[in-house]
Image (spheres, helix red, strand yellow):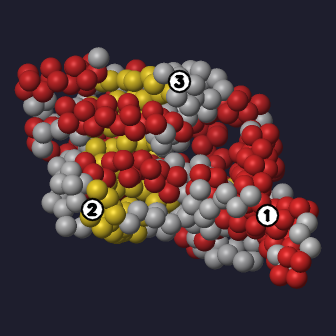
Amino acid sequence: MRYMANYDFMESIRNTQQWLGATANSMASYPAFALMPNPALHWMAAWGQVTERAFERMVVKPDWGIRSITCNDGKDHLVSVNPVVERPFGDLIHFEVLGREEQKRKVLLVAPMSGHYATLLRSTVVSLLPDAEVYITDWHNARDIPVSEGKFDIEDYTLYVVDFMKELGPDINVIAVCQPAPLVLAATAYLAEIDPSAQPNTLTLIGGPVDPNATPTEVTDFGHSVTMGQLEELMIQRVGLRYKGIGRRVYPGLLQLTSFISMNAERHAQAFSDQIFRVMAGEASEHDHHNRFYDEYLAVMDMTAEFYLSTVERIFKAGEIASNDFVVAGHKIDIGKITNVAVKTVEGENDDISAPGQCVAALDLCTGLPDELKASHLEPGAGHYGIFAGSSWRNNIRPLVLEFIDANTGGSKTAKTGRGKGAAKAKLAVAK
C-alpha cells in the first residue's frame, strides 16, 4: 500500500461517493417530479443529501466556530483566534476574548494527533474560556506539508511541546488530552533538566496511555499483535498528486476513519439511516445533533508515517515512557526530575481506549514529586470522550481541574517554591 496510487485511489473513491450523493439529490429533487409524489424519490434525495455531506466533510478542516463567549461580567465578548507560534507541523494559537481583562489562569490545551483536528476539543475550549486565557496546539494535516520540511516523529512532537511551553512561560497550566499525555509528561521532565524555570505550574493528564500495558484494551492488544513491518505495509501510503505534501509517507486520514467506524459500525449505520429519514420528514437542520457530531467526526487528517510508527513502537510496544527510558534528541529523559510541578490525572471508568490505570501510572513515574503535588480522579460511568468533552467534563471534571490549578498557582516564583503551608494544605485537599 506504500504508493501514491493507493492514496489517489482512496481519494477517488471518496470523491465518487460525494458525486453520487450530489447526483442522487439533484436528480430526485427535479421540480417536475413534484407532480407525481413518490416516497422512493424522497428517500433518494435524502440519501443523496446525507451522503454528499458526509463524504465532503472528510477532506475539510472544521472551523473553530467560536464567535463569542459570555463571561463572568455577564456580557458577551467576541473571540478572536490568533496564532502565537507558527511552525510547519503545528501552530500554537490563542483564543483572545476581546474587551476582557487578561485572566490570571493561563491554560495550554495540548490536542491529540490521532486522526482528528484540534477542533475536536472545541467544547473543551468553550468551557474554559470564561475562566481562563486558553491556548491550544493546532496540529497540521500531514498531506499539506511539503516533504522539504523534513520528518516529524514523537521526539519532534515532544520538542514542539517544549517550545510552546517555553513561549508561554512558567505561569502556564498544561492540560494534555489523550494521546499526548505521555509525551507532555516527557516534555515537562525535559524542561525540568534543561530549563527548570520554564516548567509549567500544573500538569493535568486526561485519559492518556502513559502505561498502555497497565490495563490492556483492544488498542493495546492490536499494538502487540502486529509487527512493525506489517503496520508499515498495511497502513502507510504516500500522499498523492492533489496536495502540497505529494510524496510524503503518511498514515492517511481516510484509512484511520475506516478503522474508527469499524469499531462501532452498527451504531454509525443506524445513525445515518435515522438521519436519512429525518431529512425525508423535514426534521433535519444544518446544525442538528447528527450534523454537528459527524461534521467533526468525519473530518480526518493524515499523520506522518514516522509519528504513527514511532508511537506504536516506542509508546505501546516498547513502553519507553512507562519504563522511564524515553530519549529525545539524544537526551535520556528522567521523569523523576519533575519535583515542583503539580500533576493530576483524570480517567474515565468506562474508557475503552485508554482504560483506567494507563494514565494514573504517571504519578508513580514522578518519583521526585511530593505526594501533596499529586492528584488523581476516576470519573464514574464516563467513557473516553466524556472525560474531556461531555457532561462528565462540564459538570464534574472541569471544576476539579480548575480547583487543582488554583490550589497550585501563585505566580511564577512562588509556584516553584511551594507557596507556604497554606498552599500545601490546599493542594493536599485537592489531591484527596
Q: Position of residue 232 (x, y in %)?
A: 76, 49
Total numbered badges shown on the rendered structure: 3
Lower position in the chain sequence, tag 3 or tag 2:
2
- Amino acid residing under circle 2: Asp
Q: Residues within 10 Å of mark 1 (few under 14, many from 20)?
A: many
Q: Position of residue 92 (x, y in %)?
A: 38, 61
Q: Which mark is residue 189?
A: none
SS class of the residue under badge 2?
Answer: strand
Lower position in the chain sequence, tag 3 or tag 1:
1
Q: Which mark is residue 76?
A: 2
- What residue sits right under mark 3 in the picture? 381
Q: Position of residue 227 (x, y in %)?
A: 77, 37
SS class of the residue under badge 1?
Answer: helix
- Amino acid residing under circle 3: Gly
Left/right of residue 54 with respect to residue 70 in the rendered view: right
- Amino acid residing under circle 1: Ala
- What residue sits right under mark 1 in the picture? 46
Q: Quadrant of residue 422?
A: top left
How far apart are the two marked residues, 1 and 2, measured between alpha carbons? Answer: 37 Å
SS class of the residue under badge 3?
Answer: loop
User: Which-is-in-front pick, marks 3 and 2?
Assistant: 2
Q: Residue at x 91, y 62 (%)?
A: 40
Residue at the extreme front of the image, as rendered: 35
How far apart are the two marked residues, 3 and 1, measured between alpha carbons? Answer: 36 Å
Q: Residue at x 40, y 20 (%)?
A: 364
Q: Residues within 10 Å of mark 3 (few under 14, many from 20)?
A: few
Considering the image in quadrants, where does the C terminus appear?
top left
Residue at the extreme bottom of the image, as rendered: 32
